[in-house]
Amino acid sequence: MPGPALWESMMRVALSAAADTGPDDIPIGAVVFDPSGIELARATNRREADDDPTAHAEIIALRAAAAAFGDGWRLPGCTIAVTVEPCTMCAGAITLSRVDQLIFGAWEPKTGAVGSLWDVVRDPRLSHRPQVRGGILDAECRQLLLDFFTPRRTP
């Protein structure tokens, strides 16, 4: 698995993707990198924009990366960087896509499925388990969420 400097660099690209989120969607960015570290695809949440419950940044980025990578639906050797710990749906999709590495920023205690609430990606019953590193640029990733939710939840 790449080291801290590369993880932070990849997470900064995911933060950049999150900055492109529409005004009504939660600002989460996901970027898939090929085995040599070249960006294959990036996405942001689009659930509200697309009226689609599956339009999470990770799902959109994985679809685009699979189309660009050229190995069908598989993404061997690839890394996905996500600004927030993936939910159950996204953790499952990441595992099924066969990415080698998952890095994420902010932990998500309410819905996180990479160690917080569940640990889908490291379940020993699965045939593929990506390497995981969480908490990369955690404070910056959390701040995006605070900036989004604070005005919406303050009376």
Image (spheres, rainbow, N blue to C red):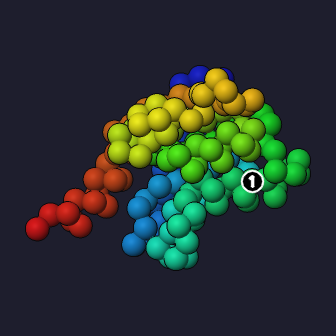
Say if residue 73 shows up in the picture. Answer: yes
Question: Which residue shows up at 63% across the image and 56% down it?
Answer: 59
Give above or below for 86 relative to 144. Answer: above
Question: Which residue shows up at 53% across the image and 67% down it?
Answer: 53
Residue 55 is situated, as x and y percent measured from the top left of the image, at: 57, 65
Q: Nearer the viewer, residue 90 or 58?
A: 90
Q: Is residue 151 left or right of residue 135?
A: left
Residue 8 is situated, as x and y percent measured from the top left of the image, at: 52, 34
Give above or below for 28 relative to 101. Answer: below
Most extreme residue toward the front, as rendered? 125
Residue annotated with mark 1:
65
Q: Is residue 17 left or right of residue 32?
A: left
Count every numbered label the image shows and give the total: 1
Residue 151 is situated, as x and y percent measured from the top left of the image, at: 21, 65
Q: Quadrant of residue 34?
A: top right
Q: Secondary structure at mark 1?
A: helix
Question: Which residue shows up at 60% across the image and 28% down it?
Answer: 123
Which quadrant of the figure contains the C terminus? bottom left
Q: What amino acid is labelled 1 in the image?
A: Ala
Q: Is residue 96 left or right of residue 114?
A: right
Mark 1 crowdedness (10 Å alpha carbons): few <14, some 14-19, many ≥20: many
Which quadrant of the figure contains the N terminus? top right
Residue 99 is situated, as x and y percent measured from the top left of the image, at: 72, 38
